[in-house]
Amino acid sequence: MTMPKRPIRFATLGGLFEQDDVDAVTKVLMAATEPSGDFFPLPEEADFQQAFARHEGASAAVMVNSCGTALDLCMMALNIGAGDEVIVPPLTFVCTATCAAARGAKVVFADVDPATLCLSPTAVREKITHRTKAIIPVHFAGLACDVREFERLSSQYGIPVIYDAAHAVGTRFEGQPIGGCGQASCYSFQSNKNFTTLGEGGAVTTNDKAFAEAVRQKKTFGFVYGPKLGVVTIGFNYRMTKPQLAVGLTQLAKIDRTIAWRLERFQRMQELLIDVEELILPASIAPGHGCHLYVVRLNTERVGFGREQLRETLKEQFGVQTTVHYPAVWSWEAFEAIDHDRSACPVAERACQEVISLPIFPKTPFEDLDYLRTALVESIHTLKRKGSQ
């Protein structure tokens, strides 16, 4: 090694929690201690929804308790069910697919773009049938997928597009926020995201007022509020809590700063690794990228070892903790019993064996980035030498 061991863990908290977040939660908790205090009503919900919709370029936002439930609600609002097909990428978190499977629909996997690792519109076109009732592209790692092409597909075939924007608070496509694209976008505020509401949380954004209301009704037991209270549909309790909503407002006030700090570090990592031929770097790290994850790929065509060997060497010899986003969705045991089509996805098949997420966060010291480069280069060289012996 060329420098002392410098352990770097993969943090479970991806955003910035500061005193304003603590103050927001404390205010809610202290108000609840008053004789008339409780955790309802929720004026923070309306404030947060309006501010978030505005930030993400949509006319409406509905706050829910996770991105998974956001996707579930969109499937319900579209009346997805048995006999329907929903097209998703294999390189994503499981809920992108299970939201459709839970409604009885067939999950159809389409390949990803080899440069961006986002769902390929060309691959999707090949998988569309008369049973296709929705397409769920993912803005992978915070990079916007090809929104223009998906909008074309939606218009041509009359198929709604629900964007999985779990990685994409603050992401832009051609300079514009992505929250108003397609039928809806589903966001995550889970603890490892750039924007987090006390561990869990999410949102649905849309420009369709009727769709927003359908989602809102489903997430609040089917209630319609007004002069006469009614229950008009079968619904659930997918609401956020008052403390989460309060901290959502403070998190929103700093998300642009959070992304800017991440962008600086992601761009520096690009510069440091540009000459490491054994790694495939992210296609684009530029303004507009949500910068949720910095994901490299081990170029398995150039080396004689696998990703897990590299991850283990980084951890054992250098104290660098990495993670994987993601194993192929169909590789999980639950999918053995789920009707799905995984044919013709060679790019995703390979990528799911190569991707490595590096531990880079808003406050990561730049010295850690230098160390990450050294750890990667020396680990690769060590493994190549072992392979040649």
Image (spheres, rainbow, N blue to C red):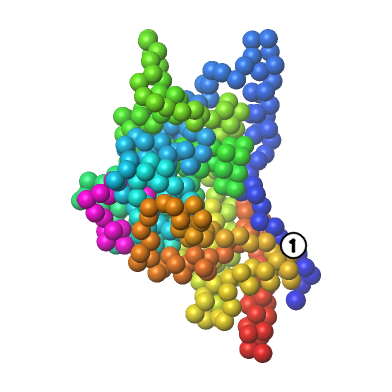
Residue in the image at 69% along x and 20% along y: 30
Q: Which residues are magenta?
A: 123-136
The kind of secondary structure element at disc 1 is loop
Residue 131 is covered by the magenta coloring: yes
- Is residue 224 positioned above or below 266 on the image? above
At label 1, the amino acid type is Pro
Asked where in the image residue 29 lies, by quadrant, the reply is top right
Residue in the image at 38% along x and 65% along y: 345
Asked where in the image residue 340 lies, by quadrant, the reply is bottom left
- What crowding class fits label 1: few (fewer than 14 Cα within 10 Å), some (14-19), or many (20 or more)? some
Residue in the image at 42% along x and 42% along y: 102
Asked where in the image residue 204 lies, by quadrant, the reply is top left
Residue 225 versus residue 82: which sits nearer the camera? 82
Horizontal and vertical percent position of residue 301 = 49, 80
Residue in the image at 64% along x and 34% along y: 21
* Quarter of the picture holding the N terminus: bottom right
Horizontal and vertical percent position of residue 125 = 27, 59
Task: Say which residue label 1 marks.
Answer: 7
* Quarter of the picture holding the C terminus: bottom right
Horizontal and vertical percent position of residue 206 = 36, 37
Left or right side of 88 for 46: right
Residue 99 is covered by the magenta coloring: no
